[in-house]
Image (cartoon, rainbow, N blue to C red):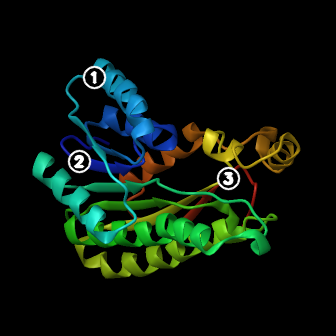
């Protein structure tokens, strides 16, 4: 199924899962608005831009740097994308922050930072998507498989992602008349630097042992699900899809 001429905004789109999603959608004719947060990610953005230009020379690619923890920043990002592309058909929000600590050690600042990224930004990205996405569009948010289980010291992380599941359900009802599908994808622990920074080798081995093939979730396990939701999976809406090799079930 072609998505020729459609515009996808991918937050966190310069590396890891976001970059893989961009590479998954580009062959379908999608034009790419790719966001990143940290100046340290600019090198990854340039590398991905060169790859996309080489493999998909007709694909328009524009990168946007922004901290999306305020509603104003989210609104500006959407306005900039519409100015550059004229429309938005697909929004995939991959941004996230992680914290592994016992609740007794979590500061107010850490709590506020975590919820600003995982809950607040997700809410206002969905809001901006609801306002701006074209009829028949797609809104997808990446959450976590810890919504279906619990492992020690991720209380704040899982809790900060949990509201997004309810946002997804509610917004799917609100946008039904526009035929906009709204879903969340809940990967298992992903084989990216985002995961390893929190874990000991023993903990990594434990997480691997709970999934198919004794491995972590790969970005290439998740990107095709995004593609499916944007194409043949358009009848799916209001759902949280757990894609984790059986790491958790619900």
Which quarter shows the N terminus? Answer: top left
Kindly indicate the quadrant of the structure image that contains residue 196: top right
Q: CA distance from mark 3 to mark 1?
A: 31 Å
User: 8 or 41, which is in the foreground?
Assistant: 41
Disc 3 or 2, which lies upstream in sequence? 2
Which label's residue is closer to the chain start, 3 or 1?
1
Please tell me which residue is depicted at 69% across the width and 44% down the height of the picture.
Answer: 197
Question: Pointer 3 and pointer 1: residues touching (CB < 8 Å)?
Answer: no
Distance of mark 3 from mark 2, alpha carbons?
Answer: 28 Å
Lower sequence index among marks 2 and 1: 2
Left of 163 or right of it: where is 34? left
Please state, as top left, top right, bottom left or bottom right, where the C terminus lies in the image: bottom right
Would you name the residue on which mark 2 appears? 7
Instruction: Report which residue position mark 1 lands on.
Output: 53
* Left or right relative to 116: residue 138: left
Kindly identify which residue carries mark 3: 188
Q: Residues within 10 Å of mark 3 (few under 14, many from 20)?
A: many
- Between marks 2 and 1 in the image, the one whose residue lies nearer the viewer: 1
Q: Is residue 67 above or below residue 183?
A: above
Task: Classify 148 as above or below 23.
Answer: below
Q: Is residue 96 left or right of residue 242?
A: left
Using the rendered image of the protein, determine whether residue 145 is visible from the camera's viewpoint: yes
Q: How many marks?
A: 3
In x, y percent, where is residue 23?
A: 40, 33
Could you give the CA–CA distance between mark 2 and mark 1, rounded to whole angstroms?
16 Å
Horizontal and vertical percent position of residue 54? 30, 18
Q: Position of residue 230 (x, y in %)?
A: 37, 52
């Amino acid at each position: 199924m072609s998505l020729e001429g459609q515009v996808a905004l991918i937050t966190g789109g310069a590396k890891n899962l976001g970059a893989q999603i961009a590479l998954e959608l580009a062959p379908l004719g999608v034009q790419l608005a790719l966001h990143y947060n940290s100046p340290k990610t600019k090198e990854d953005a340039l590398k991905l831009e060169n790859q996309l230009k080489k493999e998909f020379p007709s694909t328009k690619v524009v990168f946007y740097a922004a901290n999306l923890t305020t509603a104003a920043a989210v609104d500006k990002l959407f306005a900039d994308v519409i100015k550059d592309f004229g429309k938005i058909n697909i929004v995939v929000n991959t941004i996230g922050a992680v914290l592994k600590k016992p609740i007794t050690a979590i500061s107010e600042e850490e709590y506020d930072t975590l919820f600003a990224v995982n809950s607040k930004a997700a809410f206002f990205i969905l809001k901006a998507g609801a306002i701006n996405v074209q009829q028949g569009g797609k809104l997808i948010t990446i959450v976590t498989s810890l919504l279906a289980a619990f492992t020690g010291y991720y209380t704040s992380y899982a809790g900060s992602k949990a509201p997004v599941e309810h946002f997804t359900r509610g917004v799917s009802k609100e946008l039904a008349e526009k035929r906009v599908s709204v879903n969340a994808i809940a990967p298992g622990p992903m084989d990216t630097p985002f995961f390893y920074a929190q874990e000991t080798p023993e903990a990594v081995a434990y997480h691997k042992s709970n999934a198919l093939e004794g491995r972590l979730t790969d970005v290439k396990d998740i990107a095709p699900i995004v593609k499916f939701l944007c194409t043949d999976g358009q009848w799916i809406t209001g759902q949280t899809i757990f894609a984790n090799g059986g790491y958790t079930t619900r």
